[in-house]
Amino acid sequence: MAMLADKALIQAFEQQLDPLDVAASGMPARMLGFGEISCIIELEALPGVVLKRMPLFRSEAQAADYLDKYRTYCRLLQEAGLSLPEDDAAIVQGRDGLWVLYFLQEKLDLDTIGHRQLDRLDGAGLQHMLEAVVDAIEKVWAFNARQTRYRLALDAQLSNWAWQPDTGRLRYIDTSTPLFRVEGVEQLDPELLLASAPGFARAIIRAFFLDDVMNRYYDARAVYVDLAANLYKEQHAELIPRCVRLINERTGHDLTEKEIADYYREDKFIWSLFLSMRKLDRWLHRYVYRRQYQFILPDHIRR
Ligand SMILES: Nc1ncnc2c1ncn2[C@@H]1O[C@H](COP(=O)(O)OP(=O)(O)O)[C@@H](O)[C@H]1O
Ligand SMILES: [Mg+2]
């Protein structure tokens, strides 16, 4: 199946979109998920496809450059041995001189997404999935080790994988933040990530959190800590000991449960702060600046 973006349709969608109320817009659409930066939309007019909307760009060229990096990132992940969903992209004009990049991805069965499997699989099934995820992550580190030009980073949380227990097929879906280095040079402009944060908060994030967030996904140990700690957020803290054991056995790391708990407290703080600052910013746009707020925010994330 080759996927082709219908640019006119996506442009039409963007034109009538109300970021404050996606479902209320003229073209029937529904929100499937939220990440920290993009949001995942399903359009009735595009069955079998999800859209990931990135309203981040000041020019078409800037969006095209991001798309270019995305394509390289996907190619490298595949070279490393990961399997990715079919995809495409479209760059369209938003409001107020903004350019919006939409990634399209084949829509995978929601029940196959890693965190949704936690309630479905039995102990053996769970073990099998976690092993597959850890092995896939190891392929990325092996790729980084076997050549010197590229360094790939990865956000390995379970919500970023789709797993089919019957076939053992694992796919990595969270490709829209192309975090990688070429000859030591970071390819993702951190200011773009900051674009989704309110102006008053950028200085704080830049000073205290940005380096940490940008670097942690290159670090094998940190990625595993993040994967295990995320089980708290998914309300499955009881699985952390076995997840830690499995990671240690398969990779030779020596993670501890305490390390996971400490990390989670800090991470939860960072992202909750980020989200509350974005909500305040949305409120300011609506009632004080009286400009359209461009980002689509989740109401509440349980952590
Ligand atoms: N191709 C897809 N098919 C079905 N659901 C998806 C797909 N891509 C993303 N999702 C859903 O949206 C969530 C967030 O997507 P993701 O690509 O990880 O974005 P983010 O970078 O914002 O975390 C996923 O955890 C999953 O639940
Ligand atoms: Mg994600």
Image (tube, rainbow, N blue to C red):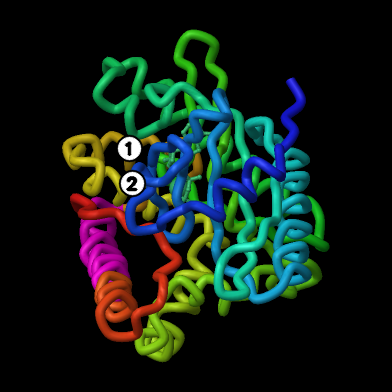
**Residue type for callout 1:** Cys
Q: Which residues are magenta?
A: 256-277
Residue underneath mark 1 = 243
Secondary structure beneath label 2:
helix
Residue underneath mark 2 = 228
Q: Residues within 10 Å of mark 2 (few under 14, many from 20)?
A: many
> How far across and how far down the image is residue 37, in percent?
46, 60
**Residue type for callout 2:** Ala
Q: Main structural element of the magenta stretch: helix, strand or loop?
A: helix
Q: Are marks 2 and 1 in contact (CB under 8 Å)?
A: yes
Q: Is residue 228 left or right of residue 5?
A: left
Asked if residue 257 is among those painted magenta in the image, a careful observer would answer yes
Question: Earlier along the polypeptide chain: callout 2 or callout 1?
Answer: 2
> How far across and how far down the image is residue 223, in percent?
46, 54
Q: Quadrant of residue 67?
A: bottom right
Q: Nearer the viewer, residue 173 or 197?
A: 197
Q: Residues within 10 Å of mark 1 (few under 14, many from 20)?
A: many
Asked if residue 285 is among those painted magenta in the image, a careful observer would answer no
Eyeballing the image, is 18 above or below 189? above
Q: Nearer the viewer, residue 130 or 234?
A: 234
> How far across and how far down the image is residue 286, in percent?
30, 74
Query: Does ligand 1 reach within 8 Å of label 1's beta carbon?
Result: no
Q: Is residue 79 left or right of residue 289?
A: right
Instruction: State how far apart marks 2 and 1 are (Cα).
Output: 6 Å
